[in-house]
Image: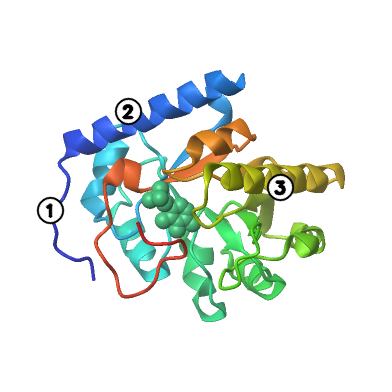
Amino acid sequence: MLICYPVPIMATIATHLQSVRARIVAACAQAGRDASQVTLLAVSKTQPADAVRAAYDAGQRAFGENYVQEGVEKIAALADLPGIQWHCIGPLQGNKTRPVAEHFDWVHSLDRLKIAERLSAQRPAGKPLLNVCIQVNIDGGASKSGVAPADALALAQAVNALPNLRLRGIMTIPDPASEAQMRAWHVRARALFDTLRQAGLPLDTLSMGMSADLEAAIAEGTTLVRVGTAIFGARPPKEAAPISAPV
Ligand SMILES: *Cc1c(COP(=O)(O)O)cnc(C)c1O
């Protein structure tokens, strides 16, 4: 299912990773934040397992996948890498929850209680709790996944009560827009994050910012940026539409 295309050589991925880390450090300095407060999630969707291995060899540990089947295949292919961490960041269907509950460490794209209940019920005994973020449709895009901001608190409280999930925060994916507009969405997400924390939820993760807007997200307090293209290069075209606008 992975398409043949020129795989960036390992040195390229290592170099790209270095420059993304440098962008994070610079943006944190600019914002008066410590760079250790921002986790880099390398989004490896559509990239072959060898590209993930190259990033791992360059020190990267957390990887994000959008498509369940593709992710599960890569998790199996890379099971020899200690400490590797897998995050599901794509839309979740009810009939695909079991492999996610069984194989991933994190889910960022939770936007329905029904899915959360299934993930909790299907999380194997003996595995650590499944870390989850609530996806919030922060810019109100009509076609997008994510709970409406006004419904986020109720969903977060219900998810927080499930036994095998550990609620960590929220994820936002605003559609590409002007710098000022992106900034406004990030400000809104940060405010919602603070509101949920003030309501007593034990959140530590604001999953916000991608290749194009990671600096703006860091300025507004993100704790985790999800970066694909800037690390692995452009993605090959795929029939299934990705969750975000194709690059
Ligand atoms: C693809 C994707 C990313 C990475 O996007 P880039 O622009 O390649 O950095 C981040 N988050 C989600 C949810 C995605 O689907």
Q: Residue 6, labelled with which disc?
A: 1
Front-lying residue, 40 or 138: 138
Q: Which marked residue is nearer to the observer: mark 1 or mark 3?
A: 3
Front-lying residue, 1 or 118: 1
Q: Which marked residue is nearer to the observer: mark 2 or mark 3?
A: 3
Mark 2 residue type: Gln
Q: Position of residue 5 (x, y in %)?
A: 14, 59
Mark 1 residue type: Pro
Q: Are the residues tagged 2 and 3 within 8 Å (C-beta)?
A: no
Q: Is mark 2 within 8 Å of ligand 1?
A: no
Instruction: Work out whether mark 2 precedes mark 1 in sequence or the reverse, and give the earlier one.
Output: 1
Q: Residues within 10 Å of mark 3 (few under 14, many from 20)?
A: some
Determine which quarter of the picture holds residue 222. Answer: top right
Instruction: Work out whether mark 1 precedes mark 3 in sequence or the reverse, and give the earlier one.
Output: 1
| Marks 1/3: CA–CA distance | 40 Å
Q: Residue furthest right?
A: 199
Q: What residue does disc 3 label? A: 188
Instruction: Work out whether mark 2 precedes mark 3 in sequence or the reverse, and give the earlier one.
Output: 2
The kind of secondary structure element at disc 1 is loop
Q: Quadrant of the C terminus?
A: bottom left
| Marks 2/3: CA–CA distance | 30 Å
Q: Is residue 74 visible?
A: yes
Q: Residue 18, labelled with which disc?
A: 2
Q: Position of residue 53 (x, y in %)?
A: 26, 44
